[in-house]
């Protein structure tokens, strides 16, 4: 390992990259969410704030800001263009993963540029769920 620990940190890069590009989606309380991206407290907070609006909860929890993943010390315009391409590629894999895991649901997977390139997904026309999840 080198002095700053960078070689040690590189061991986690393949798993982290796979988790970004092809995350596991799970269903919790009727919401389809990226695994490992929330706590029960976070989910409850969004549930309360949106009055159980599943699409809004999914969109908020599932969002991925690529600026949070990539350190951009270089030409911001160039990296922005490349990150937009990466976001589109990620969105494509998310669409495929969602369709495979939840064939009976319809999802919207969007790429936006609100805080740099951002990918999110949510159920289209999700029913409102009661507090007990039914």
Image: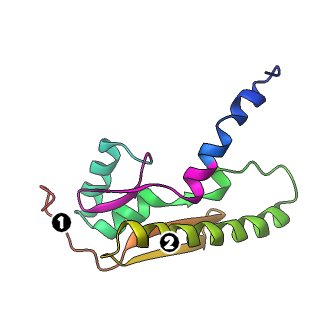
Furthest toward the front, the residue is 100
Q: Position of residue 96 (x, y in %)?
A: 50, 71
Q: Is residue 115 above or below residue 14?
A: below
Q: Give the number of the mark in front: 1 or 2.
A: 2
Range shown magenta: 17-36
Q: Position of residue 83 (x, y in %)?
A: 72, 64
Q: Which residue is identified by label 1?
A: 129
Q: Is residue 124 left or right of residue 116?
A: left
For marks 1 and 2, the one nearer the N-term is: 2
Q: Secondary structure at mark 2?
A: helix
Residue 10, located in which quarter of the rendered image?
top right
Q: Which residue is identified by label 2?
A: 96
Residue 55, located in which quarter of the rendered image?
bottom left
- 100 and 88: which one is in front? 100
Q: Secondary structure at mark 1?
A: loop
Q: Residue at x 50, y 66 (%)?
A: 120
């Amino acid at each position: 390992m080198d002095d700053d620990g960078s070689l040690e940190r590189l061991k986690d890069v393949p798993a982290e990259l796979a988790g970004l590009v092809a995350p596991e989606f799970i269903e919790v309380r009727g919401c389809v969410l990226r695994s490992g991206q929330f706590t029960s407290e976070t989910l409850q907070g969004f549930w309360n704030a949106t009055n159980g609006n599943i699409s809004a909860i999914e969109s908020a929890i599932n969002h991925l800001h690529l600026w949070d993943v990539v350190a951009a010390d270089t030409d911001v315009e160039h990296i922005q263009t490349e990150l937009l391409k990466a976001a589109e590629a990620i969105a494509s894999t998310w669409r495929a993963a969602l369709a495979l895991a939840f064939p009976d649901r319809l999802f919207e997977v969007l790429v936006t540029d609100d805080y740099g390139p951002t990918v999110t997904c949510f159920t289209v026309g999700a029913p409102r769920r009661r507090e007990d999840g039914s």
